[in-house]
Image (cartoon, rainbow, N blue to C red):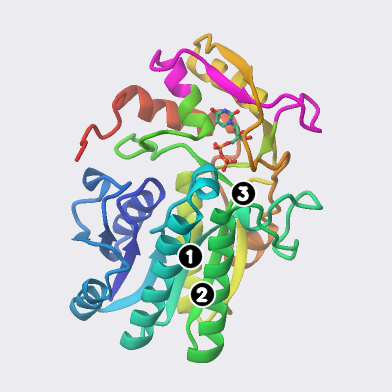
Amino acid sequence: MTVLVLGGAGYIGSHAVDQLVEKGYDVAVVDNLVTGHRQAVHPKARFYEGDIRDKSFLQSVFAKEKVEGILHFAAFSLVGESVEKPLKYFNNNIYGMQVLLEVMEEYGVKNIVFSSTAATYGEPEETPITETTPQKPTNPYGESKLTMEKMMKWCHEAYGMNFVALRYFNVAGAKENSSIGEDHDPETHLVPIILQVALGQRDSLKIFGTDYPTPDGTCIRDYVQVVDLIAAHILALEYLKNGGESTAFNLGSNTGYSVKEMLEAARKVTGKVIPAEVAPRRAGDPSILVASADKAKAILGWQPQHTDVEDIIQTAWNWHVSHPKGYNDKK
Ligand code: UDP
């Protein structure tokens, strides 16, 4: 039986494929390589290049593979871009989920572990955020992921499909041996941008807003290491295979770090000056997003190994130093 990883050539998906293969799973990957990298896919996984919205393509994959469960990472994920181009997000994310659920139904595939996001909560009224905190997204990206969660819920009720929605907070870092890592073009995320400044690839970090209602005025986020994040996906897959009920889990560290604290931590890890300058707020950024991940720990038995943010940054730094141009495979 095969685990099908959709979006398995992307940053997070490639870490999933790698960990599944290392744990002895039979793995097939679908990716359209719009943002993913072919080299990021573990050579032991079967690779199908194509788009999940292409129904006949997806059917052909399901016809070839005996799929026991799906990990679904294939989506666009940039908050700012989603505000500018909501239809792009609705088409890829929501319509992609529509086609996927149709094909799962057709082939009788029951289990799906889904990449959801803290962005489904919007500007939360409480901290830390639990899974019962109201979901009120403030951007089309969060809205698309919330809609995808709801689609799975209704298909669960109608067709007996089982799902786990994993609501990620801020994912960072790379596999410890640096064989895979984060390579976005353009890069928009804090940790890789700070490290690109440390490498001299950018002049300075722009700190987006220093007037937030936080102790140092910069936004607070909860960082989770990508290898730990993926461990939760495999636990969630096994949970579903063992008859666990369909539900959502937050994945974070229960600890928040401000942008300035992340910068300081990165200066310590890299030993570099890392120049920074104050810039205006970025549209759509909530001031504080910190997870309670107690439910994932209690029910899935999730135990993140990288609880120190310097340790997380260190794994990202090792990747950036060893791959200063990322995968360098411009298609
Ligand atoms: N951020 C920043 N400068 C940058 C990129 C990000 O100050 O060049 C801030 C951003 O405003 C947010 C935090 O860093 O408060 C994390 O942003 P990121 O894009 O990494 O993740 P998000 O929280 O949007 O998912």
Q: Secondary structure at mark 3?
A: loop
What residue range appears in magenta? Answer: 195-218
Q: Amino acid at mark 1?
A: Phe
Q: Which residue is mark 1?
A: 114
Q: Which residue is mark 3?
A: 252
> How many discs appear?
3
Q: Amino acid at mark 2?
A: Phe
Q: Residue at x 33, y 87 (%)?
A: 106
Question: In the rendering, which numbered label is found on residue 163?
Answer: 2
**Does the magenta segment cover residue 96?**
no
Look at the numbered disc 1 and say if its residue's Cβ is closer than 8 Å to ligand 1.
no
The nearer-to-camera label among 3 and 1 is 1
Name the chief secondary structure element in magenta: loop
Is residue 92 or residue 227 the one in the foreground? 92
Q: Amino acid at mark 3?
A: Gly
Q: Residue at x 56, y 83 (%)?
A: 154
Residue at mark 2 to residue at mark 1: CA–CA distance? 7 Å
